[in-house]
Amino acid sequence: MSLSHPWILHFLWLVPVMALVFIVYNRQKMRAMARFAEPELLDRLTGNTRKGRRIIRSVFLLAALGLMIFALAGPRWGSHYQEVSQKGVDIMVVLDVSLSMLVEDVKPDRLERARREISDFIQVVQGDRVGLVAFSGAAFTQCPLTFDYGALKMFLSSLRPDLVPVPGTDLGAAIETAISSFDMASRTDKVILLITDGEDNEDRGLEAAREAAKKGIKIFVFGIGDPSGGPIPAAERKGGFKKDKEGKLIMSKLNEEGLREIASVTDGRYTRSVAGDLDLDLLYFEGIRSKTEAATLKSGKIKVYEERFTLFVIAAFLFLILEVLIGVVGRERC
């Protein structure tokens, strides 16, 4: 036998406490009666039969209390195996970690904003497998598809621009790496969640998106940044901004037109980060969930224990009923 909530057994100390209360109460009651009646008369009024009934009723009440506490602890014995399955879709989160993601046209900056959005997104996914790809001038799978969202968050927190040694932004490499991370033999719906400011130095993003569409993969794009843009930091957190040959600041702007086209060719959806950390949540429920069909990702058998608390509840109620009946019978005989 095992217990679902063994800590509840600590409340069993209430049983001896209540027993002590009954004893003290009955003694005080007898002393009070002795003040108003002679010992012989008192024996007639409170004979052994009545004393016995009081003791039995008290024992039954204490037994009922103990049984109810034990029932709340969740006693269980015996077990059976139950088939379980987990349904969802496969989602590869593809995050831009290029230097332009440190632009502060959204607060605190594009990369930190994206991290916060993804963290909130992970909280709302419903049984989906989620993976993570980081890219700039090249792309690398940081976390394969997994149900371990805690591990995913750990990888997410470590992402920074110097993690990928190749400078620039290659959307094509990012999408191709995400495609190769899927098990194409699986019938599960597959989704790429592309999070970027839209810059594409290699101009291969649309071509890779068409390849994803051929494989039945939808791309949902989350644009980070402002169309008016902002200056690109010269190096991560070292001060100064990048300049062209003429000494002018190099500005990075959100390329919404290109990102919309990438989403459109795969029957996905484009959303821009506007305010707060709920934009990705809305994209998940109104976009990914509405355009995909959940499939069984994980199945197996789990051992389920048989809950037996009802037996103790029934026994407790029987003791309560007996306690009431003894009281009724005692009053009728009087």
Image: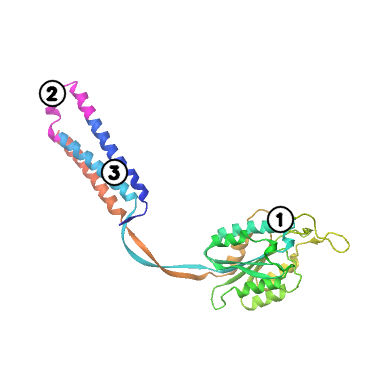
The residue shown at (13%, 35%) is: 49
- Specify the quadrant that holds the C terminus: top left
Q: Which residue is mark 3?
A: 65
Task: Name the magenta segment's main secondary structure.
Answer: helix
**Compared with residue 230, is residue 330 higher up or lower down, i.e. above or below?**
above
Q: Are marks 1 and 3 in contact (CB under 8 Å)?
A: no
* Mark 1 crowd level (few <14, some 14–19, many ≥20, 10 Å Cα): some
| Residue 242, picture quadrant | bottom right
Kindly indicate the quadrant of the structure image that contains residue 221.
bottom right
Query: Residue tagged by mark 1?
Result: 109
* Cα distance in 3D space between marks 1 and 3: 60 Å
Give the x, y percent position of residue 57: 21, 39
The residue lying at 28 percent from left, 45 percent from top is 66
Mark closer to the chain start, 3 or 2: 2
Q: What is the three-letter code of the residue carrying label 3?
A: Leu
Magenta segment, which residues?
Answer: 27-49
Mark 3 Cα-neighbour bin, 10 Å: few <14, some 14–19, many ≥20: many
Q: Residue at x 26, y 47 (%)?
A: 317
Q: Residue furthest right?
A: 246
Labels 1 and 3: the sequence-earlier one: 3
Helix, strand or loop at mark 1: loop
What is the distance, in whole Å, between disc 3 and disc 2 at their CAs? 35 Å
Neighbour tally class for label 2: few under 14, some 14-19, many 20 plus, Cα within 10 Å: few
Give the camera-side residue of 326 and 202.
202
Q: Which residue is mark 2?
A: 39
Q: Nearer the viewer, mark 1 or mark 2?
A: 1
